[in-house]
Each structure stands twice: as C-alpha cells, then as structure tokens.
Amino acid sequence: LFQVVDSRLVSVFDARELELVIAGTAEIDLNDWRNNTEYRGGYHDGHIVIRWFWAAVERFNNEQRLRLLQFVTGTSSVPYEGFAALRGSNGLRRFCI
C-alpha cells in the first residue's frame, strides 16, 4: 500500500475508516438506496411493481441485499459516501430501475 500511497495520507485513518475508503461499506442503508434510485420506462416510486420490489428488498437480510446489489451493479459494496456516489464505468451512476 505504501508503495502507492504516501503513509502520511493513510495515517489519519483508523483501520475501519481505511477499509471504508478503500472498499466502501458492506452495510446497506435501504433508505439511502431508495432515495438515490432513478426510475425509467414509466416506473416511479409509487408504481405497484416498484412497491413490490422495495417490499421484497426490505425482507432481505444484509447479505441478500449485497448480492442483489452485486448482481445489478457489479459491485457488492456501497461507496462510503452512500448510494449518491455509486459509480459505473462512466463515472457517477445512480441505481436505476
């Protein structure tokens, strides 16, 4: 790590903070996810299919939510800034249904 990043920059973080910066968070905040979701194709937050989707995700445990996130985005962690900072191959990319 210190061959790539100056140790003085890393020393300001404790182990947990450094893990969050490097890998993001593994704990899914469902409200953050919902608030940072984009809907297309006639879907909206109140659409019956969307309500079913979020009802199912609410019943998931955290591991199942992480697996869903990995399936639809390719990543199994959330950036430490939350879903608002979710990135795709072309930069910032909101979760989209």
Image (cartoon, grey):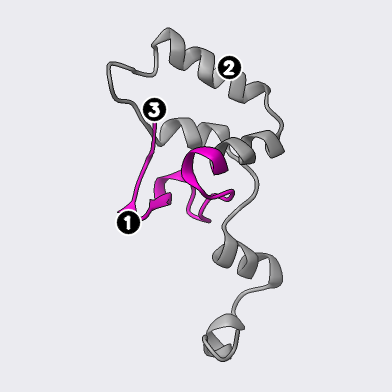
- Asked if the stretch drawn in magenta spans residue 82, the answer is yes
Above or below, 60 relative to 74: above
Mark sitting earlier along the chain (3/2): 2
Find the distance from the CA under tag 1 to the CA under tag 2.
Answer: 29 Å
Residue under label 2? 55
Find the distance from the CA under tag 1 to the CA under tag 3.
Answer: 18 Å
Residue under label 1? 91
Image spot of residue 46 (x, y percent): 39, 12
Number of marks drawn: 3
Image spot of residue 97 (x, y percent): 39, 27
Q: SS for tag 2?
A: helix
Q: Quadrant of the N terminus?
A: bottom right
Q: Quadrant of residue 15?
A: bottom right
**Residue at the image position 48 percent from the left and 14 percent from the top:** 51
Res 97 label: 3
Query: Magenta stretch?
Result: 70-97
Image spot of residue 93 (x, y percent): 35, 46
- Asked if the stretch drawn in magenta spans residue 50, the answer is no
Graded by Cα atoms within 10 Å as few (under 14), some (14 to 19) or many (20 or more), the crowding at tag 2 reads few
